Amino acid sequence: MAFSFINKEKQAAKQYTKEAEEGDVWAQYDLGRCYANGEGVEKDMKKAVYWFTKAAEQGKAKAQHNLGVSYANGEGVEKDQNKAVEWFTKAAEQGNADAQNNLGRCYHYGMGVEKDWKKAAYWYTKAAEKGNANAKINLSILGRCYDKGEGVEKDMKKAIEGFTKTVEQGYADAQYNLGMCYANGRGWR
């Protein structure tokens, strides 16, 4: 069974290569994914970045996000937070929830951009509305920051907004945090 699966992965990578070289954006993205994960080819992050770049330049949001991750982590390219933000922004503006969450993190922690809690909350919210679980957690963290005044001016209204958004997305800790805000104006778990 494993031999058959490996053969199929190799055949897929071979077909993706042919189509990617002809300029097919989907094949370029898929070939980048193959190289990133070692599916049908030997894992090679430099080749993954090469193909993600080809697809990203044609507007493929998933490739733009993956390219942002590569730059953020220095995988296959030199680490560059500014380029990570650039690619996350392109993908986020197209509605890619993972990129929206990662862009929120960039603004939240000042990675490649100046810290901007309002923009962080905006992008976390966009991603959370699409069901991104990490964005839900990040919104709750941002709510706690406003609750305690960590990195931002203390603002219970914004803390409650952050917790409320995450409660609406089904994040349990946010329910506790929101309850504590209403009960005594502060508290988190």
Image (tube, rainbow, N blue to C red):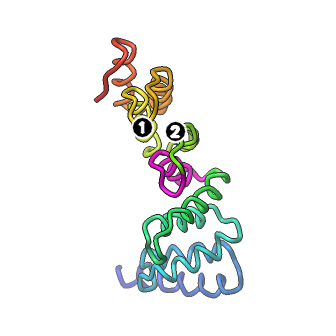
Position of 138 with respect to 12 (left or right) is left
Q: Mark 2 packing: few (<14 Cα in 10 Å), some, or many (20+)?
A: many
Position of 171 with respect to 83 (left or right) is left
Which image quarter is the C terminus in?
top left
Residue 15 image position (x, y, % from top left): 59, 85
The reply to whether discs 2 and 1 touch (Cβ–Cβ < 8 Å) is: yes
Q: First in sequence: mark 2 or mark 1?
A: 2
Q: Residue at point 46% right, 37% down?
A: 139
Q: Mark 1 packing: few (<14 Cα in 10 Å), some, or many (20+)?
A: some
The part of the chain drawn in magenta is: 96-113
Q: Residue at point 50% right, 26% down?
A: 158
As helix, strand or loop, the secondary structure at mark 2 comes to helix
- The disc at residue 117 is 2
Report the front residue among 87 and 38: 87
Chief secondary structure of the magenta portion: helix
As helix, strand or loop, the secondary structure at mark 1 comes to loop
